[in-house]
Image (cartoon, rainbow, N blue to C red):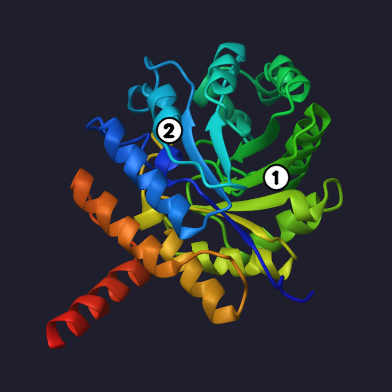
Amino acid sequence: MALPTAVKIVEVGPRDGLQNEKEFVPTATKIELINRLSAAGFPNIEAASFVSPKWVPQMADGAEVMAGIERRSGAIYSVLTPNLRGFEGALAARADEIVIFGAASEAFSQKNINCSIAESIERFAPVAQAAKEHGVRIRGSMSCALGCPYQGEVPVASVVDVVERFAALGCDEIDIADTIGVGTAKRVREVFEAVTKVFPRERLSGHFHDTYGQALANIYAALEEGIAIFHASVAGLGGCPYAKGATGNVATEDVLYLMNGLGIHTGIDLNQVVAAGDFISTAIGRANVSRAGKALLAKARSEAACS
């Protein structure tokens, strides 16, 4: 199959990336980051989370963040919503898309949200119904689709089952997420080959972590299966508190460098994203783990010093 000529990059750094930071990231810093990412041209930014601050204190300021950002026309600003109360918050904050979530692994579902896969997704039925009634997009995000820290291998059939459950809820888009970064290119192709038989290819996305350094290879494998939506996190922010040793999402700068090299259109300014990655890494005192980002920053500084 020919590679897509254009892809949509969903920037997840402001939510999925920052939610695991131990020190609270100031609201103004989050707003500044999102504004920089909007200016860079992202068509979709995961901006906040409307979950209980008891469970995710880092995301307690979701309403303030959504109220403070400068929205780029046509861009989708997504928020995570675990229940109807969260949906009400998302609606009040004028979110363009809500994100509901489940796991492909029974063991992970039990450890993460203390219920079965079927129960976890069924809980979202009233949330999905409310979203449909209000004309809000719904995205289903599936954790551990390529491996689990507790049960190990996850059967492809389990991934297909969750995709079908999300589809039944009316999800507009479904994420296949390698939460702990154990996936390989061969497995990625097997999984996407299977799920594209039960859900439209153009509405599936790949969400890869880089724990074993395989994220870009996995993205290329997904591209070969015709997948054209990918998640990435600026400066490689993020991790997973329920998956020990799991590193952050693949760095957005690295994904953009790959796409640019392949001649695949993203509509995103790589240099602006590199600057945004440098901004947030400096602001929170965290190492920038984007290889392309660090290389481009070093090149720019060297050229500036020589001029």
Front in this rendered view, residue 111 or 266:
266
Extreme residue in the top direction: 85
Front in this rendered view, residue 66 or 148:
66
Residue under label 2: 242
Residue at point 18%, 47% (across, down): 285
Reply above or below: 93 against 205: above
Residue 25: x and y in percent read 26, 34
Reply above or below: 185 against 235: below
Q: Does residue 125 appear in this view?
A: yes
Residue at point 28%, 49% (across, down): 280
Residue 104: x and y in percent read 65, 37
Quadrant of residue 62 in the image?
top left
Q: Does residue 104 appear in this view?
A: no
Residue 229, numbered label: none
Residue under label 1: 155
Q: Is residue 60 left or right of residue 22?
A: right
Residue 183: x and y in percent read 56, 56
Residue at point 68%, 16% (across, down): 123
